Amino acid sequence: MVSLRQQKVARLLQKALGSFFLSEGKSFNPGGLTSVTRVRVSPDLSIARIYLSMLGPGSPKEILEGMDSASRSIRFKLGKELGKSLRIVPELHFFHDDSAEYAQRIDSLLQTLDKPKGLEGKP
């Protein structure tokens, strides 16, 4: 069960990371957009799992590798920004959130099921 403190820290990190990717996201995803969809914080507040939705020309795997290699500098910048709110900034782990693509796939499958077979040419 997620505690109230975990939820507060997750919201704080999501907001700070959202503004970070808005201002400096072009260095990780040039020509694209990166948004933070969900943040999960461990019970001891030491690890944060950040789920990202990425639009643009780059592959999500390459973008995540770049973010993982820069996670220490991102964490440092978050520490400077959130220093008054958080005593220790959690270790950051980035993951691709593919729920939007999954929803689109399910929607397209449902649309193909809605069409009756054999009646395509008849009014």
Image: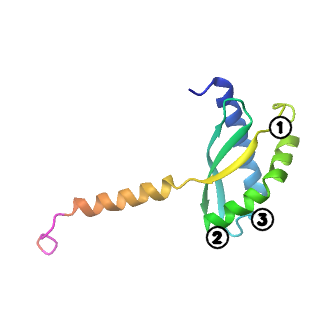
What residue is shown with label 2? 58
Observer-nearest residue: 65 or 5? 65
Observer-nearest residue: 106 or 67? 67
Which picture quadrant has residue 121? bottom left
**Res. 82 mark:** 1
Identify which amino acid the numbered label 2 is placed on: Gly
Q: With respect to residue 77, does 45 lie above or below? A: above
Q: Is residue 101 left or right of residue 116?
A: right
- Can you give x and y, in whole percent of width and height, for residue 72 in the image? 82, 51
Rounded to the nearest angstrom, the CA distance separating label 1 from label 2 is 30 Å
Label 1 Cα crowd, 10 Å radius (few <14 / some 14-19 / many 20+)? some
**Residue occupying image coordinates x 59% and y 28%:** 2
What residue is shown with label 3? 27
Write the start and end of the magenta stretch as one range: 116-121
**Residue occupying image coordinates x 62% and y 72%:** 57
Say which quadrant the C terminus sits in. bottom left
Q: Is residue 108 in view?
A: yes
Numbered disc 2: secondary structure = loop
**Residue occupying image coordinates x 42% and y 59%:** 104
Q: With respect to residue 97, does 11 lie above or below? A: above
Is 117 magenta? The answer is: yes
Numbered disc 3: secondary structure = helix
Rounded to the nearest angstrom, the CA distance separating label 2 from label 3 is 12 Å
Which of the two labelled residues, at mark 2 and mark 3, occupies the earlier sequence position? 3
- Can you give x and y, in whole percent of width and height, for residue 32 in the image? 66, 66
Q: Is residue 53 left or right of residue 73?
A: left
- Can you give x and y, in whole percent of width and height, for residue 7 in the image? 64, 30
Which picture quadrant has residue 56? bottom right
Identify which amino acid the numbered label 3 is placed on: Ser
Q: With respect to residue 4, does 22 lie above or below? A: below
Say which quadrant the N terminus sits in. top right
